[in-house]
Amino acid sequence: MKNIACISQGLSHRSIATGAPGVAPCVRFRGLVLLIFLLLFPGVAFALPQFPVRFGSGIYEGHHQHEGTIQTMDCRACHVNPTGGGMRNQHGRSFSIEKLPWTGLNEEAKKAVEALEVFPYISFGTDLRYAYLQAERESNSPFKDTFFTMQSDIYLAFTPTKHLTVYYQDGLQQNREVFGLIHSLSYNGHFKFGKFLPPYGLKIAEHTSFIREKLGFGNTFGKASESGLELGFGEEVWFGNAAIFNGSGAAPDENHEKGISATGGIKTPRFWLAGSYYRNQTGKDAANKVTRQYFGVYTAIYFQGVSFLGEWDHISVENTALKTDGQVAYAELNTLLKPGVVAKVTYDYYDPDDNNAGDRLQRITAGVDLYPYPFVEVLIQYRRNKEEIESKNDQFLMMAHLFF
């Protein structure tokens, strides 16, 4: 799951305090409807947005496994791209039709996935997200009452040999990734070269989450992918990825500095703990140089049918005149109410300058993810925003997601 591509203005720029007075009646009503919907399903099982943690080693049950395949909990278990997102591999597609829908296994979908094994050298995939967003009247977003396409991506992978894949991704928001991938090496390692999103932190689907958008990893309008090299591995427990890239979002590079990023740690079936680092300097001369440096930790924990996902990052931005230090954080709680129905609450926090008390952003999002049929997801979300200056800026979102 990956890269929702287009509502950073609609979903994240402004926010409001948690006080209920002044909330529009229709928005209040929708929030009540959503709450009632969440309470209709009392049975609690396991859940987490990262499927390897929610299902544990069960993500491999009942699937055809190629000889020598390592049963890793890392992103490469289900995606062609070892660092996650974009096209799903054969195992990822099989898992999505067998474990996610509330209708259970669909033979027609199973045959569609099996057909790809007949000619495995070329594989196609897609992500289409179409949404309706309503924001309260004081919102500064143009998406106040709007239907729109959030993502429309096409994926193509050519794998002429066991160890080589050429990968292409492009779509509506030009979130292009094009790279060569040498994979299935020792320790389940890989070498990547081309244009890609640098490895850092949790690669969650919601690109407007502050840990993606504010750090520059939202990959909307092609602004986040970089030209460079990447090395990584993903064994049963340990994983690591590191990259060196231009840092300018294009080629040729604008200066002699190179950006670097890395992430690594452990991922077990019920617990993750990892760290990340990023450094990049932009600007052609000393007068306009800007150095950005991030470091952070993230974790995932599953316990008694409830799962927690969290990330915290320190942000440092420095130029010739000023240096600021800030932080960004994300937390998420999930539970599976019944097969194909996941309840989720998330919290986003962003403070770009610890010395400035007036620029903090916070928001809470509550909703459900529904998987009624194979390759179909429906999201219903209500978002309460909070800024230092109060305004009526809550948001209600419904989205249909078709994927393959």
Image (cartoon, grey):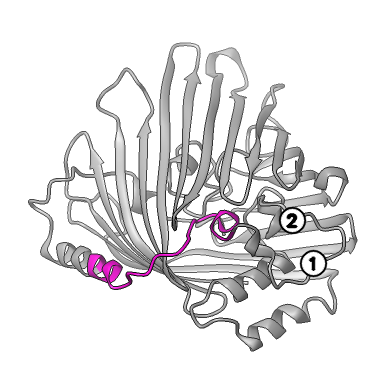
Relative to 150, does residue 16 appear above or below in the rendering? above
Report the amino acid beneath label 1.
Gln
Q: Earlier in the sequence, mark 2 or mark 1?
A: 1
- The one of 118 and 124 positioned closer to us in this rendering: 118
Pick the quarter of the image with the C terminus: bottom right
Q: Secondary structure at mark 1?
A: loop
Residue 79 point in image, percent of width and height: 69, 58
Residue 391 point in image, percent of width and height: 17, 45
Q: Which residue is mark 1?
A: 65
- The one of 67 and 295 positioned closer to us in this rendering: 67
The magenta stretch spans residue 51: yes
Q: Judge from the rendering whether residue 281 lies leftward or rightward of residue 315; answer left or right.
A: right
Q: Is residue 198 visible?
A: no
Residue 309 point in image, percent of width and height: 47, 46
Report the amino acid beneath label 2.
Gln
Pick the quarter of the image with the N terminus: bottom right
Part of the protein shown in magenta? 34-55
Q: Which residue is mark 2?
A: 71
Residue 203 point in image, percent of width and height: 56, 47
Q: Count of labels shown?
A: 2
Label 2 crowd (10 A; few <14 / some 14-19 / many >=20): some
Q: Is residue 402 visible?
A: yes
Label 1 crowd (10 A; few <14 / some 14-19 / many >=20): few
Q: Secondary structure at mark 2?
A: loop
Q: Residue at x 76, y 70 (%)?
A: 123
Mark 2 touching mark 1, by CB under 8 A?
yes
Q: Residue at x 18, y 63 (%)?
A: 27
Quarter of the rendering containing residue 173 = bottom right
User: Whole-Å distance between the Cαs marked 2 and 1?
Assistant: 9 Å
Q: Judge from the rendering whether residue 360 lies leftward or rightward of residue 102; answer left or right.
A: left
